[in-house]
Amino acid sequence: MKAKFFIWDFDGTIIDTYPRSTQILVDTMREVGVEIDYDKYIVMLRDSFGKTKQHLNMSDELFDLYLKRACTLSEPHPAPYKDVPELLEAINKSGGKNFLYTHRDKSALEYLDLYDLRHLFTECITCESDCFVHKPAADVIEHLIKKHRLDKEDTVMVGDREIDVLSGKNAGCKAILFDERRIYTETSADKKIYELCEILNFIEK
């Protein structure tokens, strides 16, 4: 499989945010007298923040407080995965393009600026963008394809969750699942990888 245009998820794909987000969840629940297991909820958050809220029976107010804390930049900052800068640069140097499509708010852009990565993306779409539709809908990817005249055969969605994979497949593109914790036994992805450096094998040159 080869691709030229890469549409990236953010949390758990570009930046390793889940350890911090999970610890904030543990601390937030502790404040209301509920002790939860870190190892259990880091897996659950990767699957769905909404499902995690339901599972913990969190009120809207408590969940909003948690999201505000999780999305606010504060030290210690979660770092990009070690191969991300080189991968983004390699794709651009090969004549390809990078795009960001995330459910996160503008804090995703703030992280990209913090680590000097934003210039490596042609366009970034967050939950505050006009064309935003929740994954696994294909709308945002179809918007990017039309706007930037991308060939679907040369376009791949890269993410750490099955909804990332399905958003790409629903748009008629390829999909790569980044499963660093080996959570998924089944996937609709064209390729499943355990380290981001494996993507070097899929860059069309």
Image (cartoon, rainbow, N blue to C red):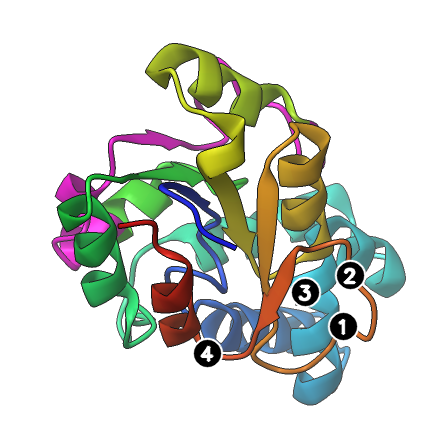
Assess disc 2: are there few (<14), some (14-19) or many (≥20) residues with their C-alpha within 10 Å of its C-alpha.
some
Q: CA distance from mark 4 to mark 3?
A: 20 Å
Q: Which residue is mark 1?
A: 184
Tell me the SS state at disc 2.
loop
Compared with residue 149, is residue 13 higher up or lower down, i.e. above or below? below
**Which stretch is magenta?**
112-137
Assess disc 3: are there few (<14), some (14-19) or many (≥20) residues with their C-alpha within 10 Å of its C-alpha.
some
The reply to whether the magenta stretch includes residue 129 is yes
Q: Which percent across, then down, holds residue 13?
A: 46, 61
Q: Quadrant of residue 172?
A: top right
Asked if the residue at tag 1 contacts the one at tag 2, i.e. Cβ–Cβ closer than 8 Å, the answer is: yes
Q: Main secondary structure of the magenta part?
A: loop
Asked if the residue at tag 4 contacts the one at tag 2, i.e. Cβ–Cβ closer than 8 Å, the answer is: no
Question: In front of the other: label 4 or label 3?
Answer: 4
Assess disc 4: are there few (<14), some (14-19) or many (≥20) residues with their C-alpha within 10 Å of its C-alpha.
some
In the figure, is residue 101 to the left or right of 121? right
Tell me the SS state at disc 3.
helix
Q: Which percent across, then down, holds residue 22?
A: 58, 73
Q: Which residue is mark 4?
A: 195
Q: Residue placed at 81% from the left, 54% from the top?
A: 51
Q: Which percent across, then down, holds residue 70?
A: 48, 58
Compared with residue 25, is residue 115 higher up or lower down, i.e. above or below? above
Residue type at mark 1 is Tyr
Q: CA distance from mark 3 to mark 1?
A: 14 Å
Q: Which residue is mark 3?
A: 45
Query: Does any portion of residue 14 appear in the rendered image?
Result: yes
Q: Which residue is mark 2?
A: 187
